[in-house]
Image (cartoon, rainbow, N blue to C red):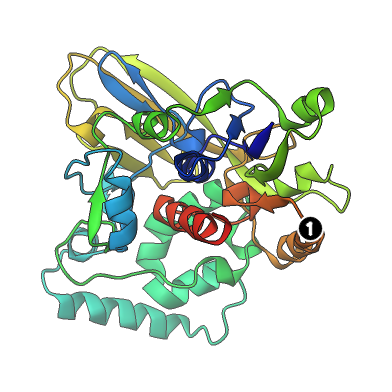
Amino acid sequence: MYDYLVVGAGLYGSIFAYEAHKRGKRVLLIDRRKHIGGNIYTENINGINVHKYGAHIFHTSNKKVWDYINEFAEFNNYINSPLAVYEDELYNLPFNMNTFSKLWNIKTPKEAKEIIAKQIEELDIKEPGNLEEQALSLVGRDVYEKLIKGYTKKQWGRDCTELPAFIIKRLPLRFTYDNNYFNDRYQGIPIGGYTAIIEKLLYGIEVRLDTDYKSFFKEYGNVAAKTIYTGMIDEYYDYKLGVLEYRSLRFESEELHTENYQGNAVVNYTKEDIPYTRIIEHKHFEHVHTDTTIVSKEYPCEWKIGDEAYYPINDDKNIKLYEAYRELADKEENLIFGGRLGEYKYYDMDKVILAALELVEKEL
């Protein structure tokens, strides 16, 4: 009946479905969730577009990607400038002169560089054997202890001495008073939320939500010449080679009867004894004016089959297992795996768009 069955209504699957439909292909898109948009889904609650699966801030240096996504939304001028709380202290992120000035009561880049260099020299770490040693060798003890150690342990559920060094390849230190988290040329939040983008992409396409692929296939069989599968690659093969590991997230959201709770969209909590990693106040993404506000606390947690998978654990064991599944996938004639779960990698949104457009170029 269809030229393409697209499994997953996230950004990758929706872009491919849109481009195939535009070229006259017959497309059916299914998703096991009750809504479109995947993890970029936003829901308007009392005038505030709530990022239901965590903060999503669009940023890219790729003009082709920027021009493409702007066909479907107008972006505001939001600049990501998160804050970090350590005990009763408040710091700017990324690590910059505002951070260093608060840490050491200094003013100049020269002073900051000297303090960091002295701390690194005193530690004398030749070959970092774990994440803690890697971070210490890059930023010194003060930045690590207050802004990295507890947050990272919560994020990964393991002590930093138990995590491999490669997780932190670099830690950017900026010796300017600039709180812009991203260096990318283009940045912003789509006015009206991300869900509106997906609605435009999927306009005119047959979409079935609350539909699991395995159950659908069992009932209807193979309904398309080709399948674009954006779910978990190991789940597709019934985990027959083993289970790929992830970290998951849990969100606690509430509406507060105050106009402004924390004065910033994203505030990180870096102390280990605070169970959540950050609080998101959604209204600041789009600078909306409402009498109430909605905040979400983000709790990292262990992942198990059936949970939402967020961050792939790309250690040697899991990479080797993914490559084994990739070998199976490469033998499939009419099946293409794509996206964050299909390729077992963490994708920023601009990289998802680029990957989807590359598939369009190759396939269509």
Label 1: state its secondary structure: helix
Name the residue at 20% across, 44% down: 78
What residue sits 28% from the left and 43% below the top? 71
Image quadrant containing the N terminus: top right
Q: Residue at x 71, y 37 (%)?
A: 224
Residue 77 quadrant: top left
Q: Quadrant of residue 181?
A: bottom left
Position of 97 relative to 266 (above/below): below
The location of residue 179, given as percent across then percent down, is: 20, 56
Residue at the disc numbered 1: 325
Q: Indicate the quadrant where residue 279 lies.
A: top left
The residue drawn where x is 51% and y is 83% is 125
On the image, the x and y values in percent for residue 264 come to: 23, 37
* Residue farthest along the front direction in this orientation: 24
Nearer to the camera, 352 or 52: 352
Q: Tell me the quadrant of the picture where the C terminus can be found.
A: bottom right
The front one of 193 and 71 is 71
Q: Residues within 10 Å of mark 1 (few under 14, many from 20)?
A: many
Q: Amino acid at mark 1?
A: Tyr
Residue 79 left/right relative to 170? left
Give how far across and how far down residue 39 sits, in percent: 49, 36
Q: Is residue 360 left or right of residue 195?
A: right
- On screen, residue 15 above or below 52: below
Above or below — where is 361 with respect to 47? below
Instruction: Please indicate whether residue 237 sits to the left or right of residue 165 in the image.
Output: right
